[in-house]
Image (cartoon, helix red, strand yellow):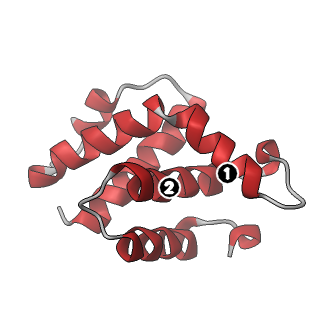
Amino acid sequence: MRRREAREFVLSALYQREFRDTSLKEMLAEINPGDQRSYIERVFAGIIAHRDEIDALISQRTVGWRFERLAFIDRNILRLGIFELLYLPEVPPEVAIDEAVELCKKYGTDNAR
């Protein structure tokens, strides 16, 4: 599994978590993450741990939109990108931003594009 696929998996796991109480362990059992397992676990757990802080940052910067109005998928793309920017110094900022943009192009709603 490549890093981009790992990001897509984390995004999917975050999205699923919005609707049902499934553990990351259960979701990982359905795929073979290979060498990306630690990245997936670290990012998923980190986003959950820092969710309130990340959501506050998003809320402060959404002009004309309340956070609650953002689609679940768009929220989670933002959470993933912001987490990588703030908490993963090994990911260059331009990579974190580009990857979030690519996720948005592929999965985001029309309002997010």
Q: Which of 107 and 53 is in front in this view?
A: 53
- Taking the image as shown, residue 13 lies to the left or right of residue 55, namely left
Q: Where is residue 7 in the image (x, y as percent from the top left)?
A: 35, 58
Q: Mark 2 points at which residue?
A: 82
Q: Which of 19 and 102 is in front in this view?
A: 102
Disc 2 element: helix
In this view, the residue farthest toward the right is 64
Name the side, left or right, on which 74 lies relative to 50.
right
Q: Which residue lies furthest to the left in this view?
A: 35
Quick one: quadrant of the C terminus? Answer: bottom right
Dot 1 or dot 2: first in sequence order is 1
Q: Residues within 10 Å of mark 2 (few under 14, many from 20)?
A: many
At horizontal 44% and vertical 50% (from top left) the residue drawn is 83
Q: Is residue 13 left or right of residue 58?
A: left
Residue 58 disc label: 1
Q: Which residue is located at x 64 percent, y 42 percent?
A: 55
Whether 102 is drawn above or below 38: the answer is below
At which x and y percent is residue 57?
65, 48
Percent across and percent down for residue 12 are: 44, 49
Vertical arrangement, residue 27 with respect to residue 100, above or below: above
